[in-house]
Image: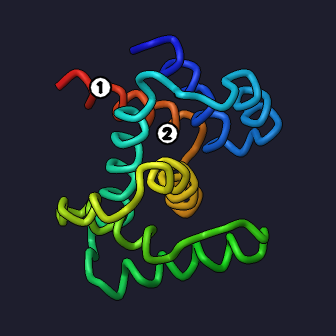
Amino acid sequence: MTSQAAQYKELLRALFKGHTDQARELADQMGDGPFTGTGPLLMAVFGLAVDRRFKNDQSHAAVMTFVQEVSDAFSAAQAPFNPLHAELLVRSALGEDELFQQVPGDQASALMAPLADKIIGDLHMSDEEIDAFLNEAESLLTL
């Protein structure tokens, strides 16, 4: 893992644990990019989160309910959000691989971490579970 990817993993750890000040500080340290080696880690984290969230129900209705919940949260925060892109990312992680191509790269990168954060928050993971989750995602990179 590159040093930037390792730093990004720590940023995700802080984000998922709700340490927003630490996450913001790490983001500031990383700058505006490009972030060498972070894409595969983000994709592994996102894919693993989606697998856990939709393990028992991968229906279109379940995906749309999740997207609506995220849309409501983004709206409350007055942050830009494209529900179609979120839906396509989730569905691509559930096996409809061709849909990933329909989301611009910068949009995919900007959405995957907040979507994963929402899932992890909904799963009420402990700090230890978050650590194990990130280690599992990292281990997927070496397969």
Pinpoint residue 91: horizontal percent, then vertical percent.
29, 68
Pinpoint residue 63: horizontal percent, then vertical percent.
37, 77
The image quarter in which residue 142 lies: top left
Which quadrant of the rendered structure holds the C terminus?
top left
Label 1 crowd bin: few (<14), some (14–19), many (20+), radius 10 Å: few
Q: Would residue 23 be found to the left or right of residue 97 on screen?
A: right
Pick the residue in front: 65 or 127.
Answer: 65
How far is mark 1 from mark 2, CA to CA?
Answer: 15 Å
Pinpoint residue 112: horizontal percent, then vertical percent.
48, 52
Which of label 1 and label 2 is nearer to you?
1
> Residue flagged by tag 2: what amino acid is it?
Glu
In this rendering, the answer to whether 24 lies above or below 106 is above
At 50% from the left and 60% from the top, the residue drawn is: 119
Q: On residue 9, which mark appears?
A: none
At 60% from the left and 70% from the top, the residue drawn is: 81
In this rendering, the answer to whether 115 lies above or below 39 is below
Question: Which residue bears the numbered disc 1?
Answer: 139
Colour convention = rainbow
Q: On residue 129, which mark appears?
A: 2
Pick the residue in front: 130 or 113.
Answer: 113
Q: Element type at marker 2?
A: helix
Earlier along the polypeptide chain: callout 1 or callout 2?
2
Which quadrant of the rendered structure holds the N terminus?
top left
Q: Would residue 33 be found to the left or right of residue 37 on screen?
A: right
Residue closest to the far top:
3
Label 2 crowd bin: few (<14), some (14–19), many (20+), radius 10 Å: few
